[in-house]
Image: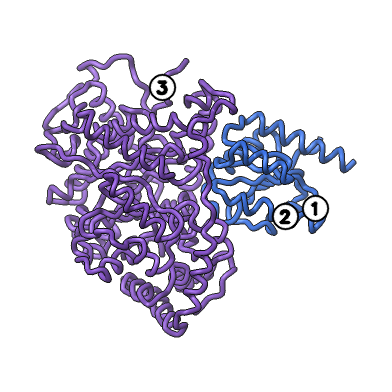
Amino acid sequence: MKHNSHPTISLKPVYTPEDLNDFNYRQDLNDPGAFPYTRGRMSGVRSSWVQRGLSGEGDASRSNEQFKYLIQQGQTGIDVIGDTPTMICMDPDHPFSVPTVGTQGVSLCCLYDYLGLFKDIPLDSIAISSSIPNIFTLSGLYLAAKKNGFDTDKLRGSVIQSPFFFEECGYTAHLPFPLRLRLTLDSIEFCLKKMPKFHSFLENTYFFSETGLTTDEEIAFGFVEMRHTIRQLLKRGLEIDDIARHIVWLVNCRMDFFEEIAKIRATRRIFARMMRDEFGAKNPRSQSLTMTCHTSGIALTAQQPFNNIVRGAIQCAALVMAGIQAIEISAFDEPFRTPSPESHLVSLRTQQVIDLESGIGKVHDPLGGSYLVESLTNQMEQKILDGVRKVEALGDPADLSAKGWFKKFFEDSMERYHKDIESKQRIKVGTNVHQMPEHEDTMLRDVAEAKIQPYIWHVERIRRYKERRDRDTIKEALLTLKHTARDTSDNLMDSILEAFEKGATIGEITGALRTAYDCPYDPYNKMASPL
Amino acid sequence: MKKIRVLIGMMGLDQHEAGAISVSRLLRDAGMEVVYMGRFNSSDMIIRAALQEDVDVIGLSFHSWDFLYYVPEMIEMMKERDITIPIIVGGSVITKDDANKLRAMGTADAFCPSAADHEIIESINTIARQGSERDE
């Protein structure tokens, strides 16, 4: 039987000094905390990483309780996922939203929801990372912090910026590419001024690599998106050293243990050289990349869900060896749902056992100097750089995105991944080998298969909330936003914040932005425009 | 011999398309004609397209629990309009228990994530053949 999980780079039985021709320690590795940061951005006594889990379900109040429980159990960061309507900027009372409100994340459609979400959460001392669309997660956090008396200069956390891929491969909000790019640039620019400690530019390669991309493709596409976005920010007159220190990269991690470690090390090295040599960044902080990870969902299986706990532990160990700054382990019930209380705890305890019992995290880059890992890192670096060159040689990446080139690539990747499992080219224990009859595969199934019912009462609450507002005030704020959006030289964040603070919802604000770009207010033609 | 025509679609706001695309390509490679509706459909849109395209089977893919809402709605809507095109349902979140309930509810078949490619193909072949025998 084959015993690898289909790596990008095939492994040999043994590695020797001959695999590292022309190896130069100072040039290729150097010490931890020194250029090119292959071994990580920090030096000295190694501190722990941010330990968190994907959270958010039901409404704001339910999710607030979830945050507090996880913090009480030792979680050191918060990561928020919205339900599907929230992720695609639609209100819960939209007819298409109703069956899914609160079932796969938290429903957040107005400032009132964000105030409930962050009630009694120490926003000045815990990092809030979010998968929710940039303008709303920033508006909600910024306004909630202000209203609760926190200094917004101290806010820490991150927000996904993915003008290329989020719409095509993650969550489709029916926003044209120029608007998506503008919202990315405007929100990053806003944060540089108003939330200076916040990682406003999170390059997320997790979600699109879940189509089954190889590890080098994942990172190459991430660099293509990041480089395009940086160039646009520089065109606005921003300095590279101001931009770069706000960048953080969230990668995927599947089951190819050494390859994932090599990927992370190669990414840091490429980033450092790109920042210094291509973009002219001078500050060491601008050259040393902060990296975080959400472990792979597609590496997990619906069959024998207990196996997923083992997978999470292996992935977490790899990430700690690679020197990652924050980790979220996809919970064992990931194939079925957002994490249950039980799976949240297992994922968190997995990190804590590795952190506090194993000693894996005591040494920076413990695999540095390994013939295998250095050879893989070199090969991975070359593959990633080749991938970036190939894609950029095809023309303006923005045009490629608009034409659906990436979408087609992802679709082909999905098919390849599926066929690899079906043909056993990719081994999945419990799925294509060592299967069990369904009647025996019962361990943890009751937890994994428990369903969350839609929060219908929350839909009613939002309907009542909308009726209570002063319609003229909302309309005026939305018209101001639309007018601002027509002028592409203005930053939209102030108008978005004003509308949000006055009570407009995410569906209304997004609708106003769409109409400014001559798109329908509601892409499904079910909601009347208040404009 | 007439090719089997299968409509594949997703409902409501369900975003994750991997399963629908994989199954569509699988059926295409098995010699069937696939009418791919993609994401963001309502029950009415699927039924109207199925009639216009004269498909033998309607295939619905779900990555979320929305199937609990949409499948009964579609079955009811088809009963009201006296339409008998068989519906099959598949998805990453569908459990064995869900599959049994969906079949009891009136779907022609339902597939869990453990379903092998050949099982899906054989099931659709059987359902479509039974449908054409009824029509004759």
Which residue type does callout 2 highlight?
Answer: Ile
Q: Which chain does the residue under circle 1 lie in?
A: B
Q: Colour of chain A?
A: purple
Q: Which chain is blue?
A: B
Name the mark on residue B83. Answer: 1
Verify CB contact (< 8 Å) between mark 1 and mark 3.
no
Task: Give SS at disc 2.
Answer: helix
Q: Which residue is mark 3?
A: A4
Question: Could you tell me residue A358's position as x and y percent?
Answer: 23, 28
Q: Which residue is mark 2?
A: B47
- Taking depth in this image into account, of B46 and A383 the one nearest to the observer is B46
Which residue corresponds to the image point at 34% horizontal and 54% vertical from the top-left?
Answer: A130
Which residue corresponds to the image point at 62% horizontal and 50% vertical from the top-left?
Answer: B68
Which residue type does callout 3 highlight?
Answer: Asn
Question: Could you tell me residue A414's position as x and y percent?
Answer: 51, 38
First of labels 1, 2 by sequence position: 2
Which residue corresponds to the image point at 28% horizontal and 43% vertical from the top-left?
Answer: A51
User: Among all residues in the image, which is located at the extreme left?
Assistant: A44
Which residue type does callout 1 highlight?
Answer: Ile
Any part of residue B23 in sight: yes
Estimate the spatial distance between the alpha carbons at disc 3 and disc 2, rounded to whole Å. Answer: 45 Å
Verify CB contact (< 8 Å) between mark 1 and mark 2.
yes
